[in-house]
Every structure is written in structure tokens, then in C-alpha cells.
Image (cartoon, coloured by chain):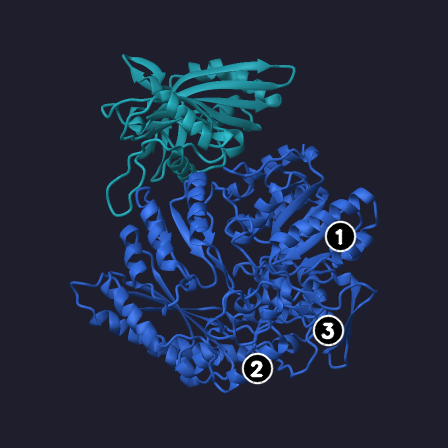
Amino acid sequence: MLMQFQKGDIVRHLGLLDLQRTMQRALRRSGLPIAYSNGFNPHIVMSFASALSSGIPGDAELLDVSLHGETTEEACMEAMNRVLPPALHVSRIRLVDDRFPKVSAALRQAEYRITLWGEDALKIAGAIPDFLAQSEIMALRKTKRAEAMVNIRPMIHLLEAQTNAETKTVVLTARVSFVEAATLKPDLLLSSLCAFAGVDTPKCEIRRTCLLGEKDGQSVPLIDL
Amino acid sequence: MLKEQIDSLLDRVQKPARYMGGEMNCVLKDPESVDIRYAFAFPDVYEVGMSHLGSRILYDIINKRPDALCERVFMPWVDMADLMRQEGVPLFSIETRSPIGGFDMLGFTLQYEMSYTNILEMLDLSGIPLRSEDRTWDHPIVIAGGPCAFNPEPLYAFIDAFSIGDGEISTLETIDVVKQCKQEGVSREECLRRLSKLHGVYVPSLYRAEYHEDGTLASFEPTEEGVPRTVVKNMIADIDKADYPESIIVPYMEIVHDRINIEVLRGCTRGCRFCQAGMIYRPVRERSVEHLLDLAQKLVDATGYEEITLSSLSTGDYTCLPELAHKLMEKFQEERIALSLPSLRLDSKLKETLEETQKVRKTSLTYAMEAGTQRLRDVINKGITEENLMSSVSDAFAGGWSSVKLYFMFGLPTETTEDLNGIADLASKVVRKYFETPKNVRARGLRVNCSASCFVPKPFTPFQWEPQDTIEQFEEKQKHLCQIMHIQGVEFNWHTPQVSFLEACFARGDRKMADVLEAAWRLGCRFDGWTDQFSFENWMKAFEQCGIDPAFYANRRREKGELLPWSFIDAGVTEAYLWREHERAMRAETTPDCRKGCQGCGLKRFEGACEGR
């Protein structure tokens, strides 16, 4: 069962472990035919497409849960929304068979919406065309193991700004690579962009709006793969 | 505005899930639809407070009333508390992030003395005057209950009214009174006066304490007519009929006891002489097997928890434990729900049940031996023998357990070096038992976890007259223990005596301790139960500032007949009974469980108590 859910603003601080526990308990309450692992401490067989950092809300996160019996998408949807708090609302269910690829491995890109406020926000929006025109954008990428200067330009697939000059609000839509070898975190993208625009990173709000996979050379929402 | 402000603070603190709210099964009510808004406060962090069963019971009971709502509040961790002060954010409730100062009632649960500074911190963060006398109707009525309310005096200045004993009915009665007073528009003083007339409620401002020159209590009297001289604890005779939550909040973050907790019985009559809970929660009252099975099913359905704990002071004493455990096991095996039985008594007929428990999951075994020799165990009336322990661990090792916890106390009355050596002796014997178990039967990786805590004499126990060991005595004994506890396979843990010393001061403190408490809080003391936050130095400074000698409370022997600060409370057990037990302790004479014959503790005076015994 592929379950697309929202990680709402009020629960944005949940870490992966908290979210895992919450989902497990909700699944247990749901009455759905959940599959358990074998072994000494049986647990629910499930995996998230991607761990969303604590502090960032998400509009369409994805959880893959193994079921071992017959059910319908409508029944799953109803059952899960009955047992999950409103802040973790399920927006879509798709039942797929075991041949469906592992969701975390199928993930290619992620889309973020970054809202910026203030005078600098407008400068940042203005700098986008020139920023993208560069053939190479070097940035310091930190991973668990090492730090390295990498060219992040190929990892940016889309970067657009919607500007409201009156309220000095800029909403960026950014689609970036999300694969093991080349993941671009939105905060790194933002700090590179701000450095390019010559301003400090302003007050901002980041949310993940979509997780994407690739089908016939096209980017599609992971759940539609 | 406040809500957004709080939200932005959450980006800047450790463990924001502590303040997040919105958990599954939390109760949200429209404030306009109720007469009384009750804030239920646990003076420690969320993950500790959410693990407390009593709070969950009262939260449920208050919210069941259509005319009241109950929201939770916990002590924010130091990072959050400091940020809140900095940004001018008042203490707020978890459910709706409303300022605590605006609630009608604020109820604190007093689970341990070392949380007292947190109460002052929480009042201050709420903008509520610390002292009861400075409050008006603009502030909530501040109530406190729980085990520490049996000696409320160190908090007398800060709490408007204490509720003593079982809270299920009393809490509702206090709500009725406050509601009526608000509707009638009477003064706050009148409201407190009316509260003082409720059964089991103590309003400290309506009593006067006078002291002898040596600091002991000379008299303790109500200041006006009609205020009861003695406050008799509340006792619910039939807990099977008492409300119990059928749905509980499921926190997002991991809490200390992250499971379903079902109270199978209340009270304990084994009569361990150091144990306050065993005295103040008398008599023993049980829930029926049918009720418990029904509750278990409802709670599993409502929460999705994967573990159930049967809790009480002594679950092994539950009359139908094998039947209950068996039925629970049968019912929930399919759903892969583990059953754990804490505070297991060695001498209960539990072998059968234990063997079934391990079918689902293996939990570690805990033995509260409390003292190292039979003589000292007789003094404290801990009815466990070395043979009990040995036969039980022998079975456990043969059954595939390899992890055992042993709990001891030191500094007990009449203790000698021989008793301390007995602790090491018992631990070695447990290790030997493991190695005697055939290799092909026993599990690998022996772990004997042995811990020794400092004895704290508590009110309403036969040791309430006894001096506590001084810090120096404790340290000396500790040094000795550390030397003799170098045993292969045994890990020895001990607690620092400084905290136990302060605990002893508050446990048997009088009104003068209130000033020390406030002084300590003003010096920055809070979270005293947390080793990384505890500052003994500041506490000693506070005693000095108030000109009070802590040894007067901790290390002084009380004479028989001394008017004790908690004497005005009738906790069920009588002073005559406690003194009798004290004398028997000094003679190392044991007293059998009263279920084998009434010991005249005083509970029979209560209607409906000890029925069928």
C-alpha cells in the first residue's frame, strides 16, 4: 500500500523515529491487514520514501506498507484517516503489488516551496535568471562522512520565483535532485542563491511539496510510478 | 499571536515535540462551552509527566464533564523556559497553547519532593504570584494532590488548597465548589473557605502553626470556626466502579513509560516499613478481571500500543493474576502485544504466568531486595528471603533470562557493616546461580544490575521518627560498597546522597521549608531531580539565607509524642499503629500481611474499607 500523506505544520518537528512510531501505532489501530516481519521482535513492514528533516513540513510524503490480505484503496484511506491525527492527513492511497520498486530507490527529485520575506527576498528573486545562467555553481556539500565542494547546477531542475512586491514576499519553487549520489538540500540551494545575490539568508519557510520518480524519461509523482 | 510566537520558539529548542500537542486522542473542547477551565500540571518535562497514570485518569475524568475542560501543562525544559522568559511568552497549555494564568483552576500533581522548585518556576512563568496570599480572582485557584500532599507543609505558602488521597472524586468536588463560587461571585477567600470544608481538602491559609524555641511544632490549629481540625484523606472504597480512561493520548515522542498502563489494584498491605506508598494508599482494592480485560481491549483499540503493563504497588498480589495474565495473553497474542509485569514479588505463584509471558517477549527481571541481610529485611518488614530470591533467579536462568536487576537501600535504621556486606554476598550468589545453570540451558551474557539508593525516612511510615544518615555517613558506606561490589558480572550503581538529603528535608519539612524552597528557586534551582541541573551548593546557600539547619529535618530523631507537621492529616493508618510497627522494627520483628489477619492499622475506621477481609 502506497500512502501519500501530509506532514502538517504543527507536526513539522517530528523526526523520522517519532513519525515511524506514530505510523506504526496508527496502522495497528486501523484494522487493515498489516504484514509483520518474522523474527524475535515482529514489526510492521513499512518504509518511507524519504526522511523529511525535523522542522520541515511536507504536503505529499510517501509511506510504503506491506499488507497481506484483500482490501480496497477507499477502505485504506478511510481507515487511516480515522486513526491518524488531522495533521497527518492521508491524501491518496494506491495499492500496488510486490513488484513495485522500493520507493526510496525510485525517488529521483523533490520539489520544495520556499517562502522568503523582506527587502532581500526581492533581490534574491531578481538574481535567479543570472544564477541559473551559470554553467557551474560550486557549493560546499556536507554529508555524514565528508564535506566537499560540488557543482550543484546539474542538480537544479527548476527554480522559479513568484514575487509579491507589496508584501515583500517571494515564493520559490525549486525542484532538485534527490538520489543517493546527488541530493541537493533546499537550505544549501538557498544559501548559494543568497550568496550569489549578495545578501544574507532572510527569514524563510521551507516545505516539501512533492516527491518525484522517473517514468519513460518524464518526472512523475512517486505514487504514480 | 501567542500561538505563532510559541511556534517560532519551537524551531529553537531541543525536543520540540514536548510542546507540540495535537497528539492522537488529546481532548479539544470549546472554551466557550464550559464553566471551568482546568489546567493539569505535572512539574517535570513532558516525557516524564505523560508517563504518569494518575494524571491520565484525572485528565479523563475532568474532560468527561460537559461543564469543564482539562488541558495539560508540563515544565518546559531549561532551554525553552529561558527562551520563554526572554521573549515574554507565558507558560501555555499543550492542547490550545493558552496562557496558564487565564485558567480557572491549576492542579499540580506532587509525585516527588525534588520537583518542588519546578512548581515555583511554573507559577512564575505563568505570571501567577508565587504566594497564595498575593493572588486574586484574576489568577487560577491553585490545587495540589498526589503522594507528597500527605505532608503539604513545605508548599503551604504556594498552594491554595491540597487534595489529600484518591483524586477521582475529590477533583470533581473542588471543580463544583469553584464553579459555584464563580457563579455566585463570592470572594476568593470565601471560595477557599468552602474548599476547606470538602472531605480531604486542606487549605493552608486557614491554619496557624506555632513553634517551640527548638524549632519543633508547638501547635497547629484552624484559624476559624468550621474549618476541620483534622483533614481525613479521600479513599474510594470500590475502585472497580471508579472511572478509568478507555482512551489515552498517544504521544509522538517516546515517553518514559510508552505503553498501556492498567491499574489492577490500588494499595498494598505487605507493610514494608520504609514504604510510604504502602501506608498511604491503603487499603488494597482490586479491579475485576472482566473490567480489566475490557479496559485492555478498549485501550489497545484506541491507541495501537504494542505493550500492556499491569501496574500497582504490588501486581503479584492481585488475587486473580494468573487468570488475568492468561486471558490477556490469549486475547492479544494475535495482535503481537507484549505483557509486562512490573514490581514482581518473588514469593507469588507466578511461575506459570512468567513462562507464558516469555512466549511473547523477554523482559528483564527486577528484584527489590532492599536490604542485604535477613535481619535487616526483618527490621524493614520486607518479606523476602534469600531462598525466595535464589529459587526465583534459578528458575529465571533456566528459563532463558540472563539479565537481572537487584534493588537495595542503604542507610536503613539499625544498619551495620554486616548488612552492607550482605548486599555483595547476595549479588555474588546470584552470579554463582547463573554459572550453576547448565550451559546449554542458560542464555548468554549474564548481567546483574545492582543498585543501592539512600534511605529517606517518610511521613506516615513507621520510620517517620528516624534520623536519616548524614551525607558523611552515606559517603562512607558508599565507599565501602564500591569496594566490595567489584564482582564479575555485576554492575553496581549508586545514587549521590545530596539529593536524598534534600528529599528528606522536604519529606518531613514544616512551613519553614517554604522559605528555603523559594530562596533556592530564586538562586536558580529547578529540575533538582536531574543530576545535570542539581546544584547542592545553591541549596546550601538557600538554607543559610533562611537561617535554617537542614539537619534539623533530615538527621534528627523525633521523640514519640512530638507534634509532627503532618499530624493534622488522617492518612488512614493511625500514629499508634505506626509507633507499634516502629517498635517491632527495632526488635527486628516482622508483621504479616494484614490479609492474613488484621493488624489494626486504622483503615477499618473507613466506610467500605477492608471489606470481605
How many residues crowd mark 3 within 10 Å: few (<14), some (14–19), many (20+)?
few
Check residue B316 in the rendering and tell me which mark sits there, or answer none.
none
- Left or right of residue B434, residue B408 in this image: right
Asked if marks 3 and 2 fall on the same chain, the answer is yes
Q: Which of pointers 2 and 1 indicates the residue nearer the eye?
A: 2
Q: Amino acid at mark 3?
A: Gly
- Element at label 1: loop
| Residue denoted by label 2 | B580
Mark 1 or mark 2, which is nearer the start of the sequence?
1
- Element at label 2: helix
Tag 3 subunit: B
Find residue B519 and report its horizontal and vertical position in percent. Answer: 70, 63
| Residue denoted by label 1 | B129
For chain B, give the colour: blue
| Residue denoted by label 3 | B547
Asked if marks 2 and 1 fall on the same chain, the answer is yes
Front-most of residues B578 and B158: B578
- Element at label 3: loop
Q: Amino acid at mark 2?
A: Arg
Front-most of residues B404 and B286: B286
- Left or right of residue B374, residue B440 in this image: left
Tag 2 subunit: B
> What is the distance, in whole Å, between disc 2 and disc 1 at their CAs?
43 Å
How many residues crowd mark 2 within 10 Å: few (<14), some (14–19), many (20+)?
few
For chain A, give the colour: cyan
How many residues crowd mark 1 within 10 Å: few (<14), some (14–19), many (20+)?
some
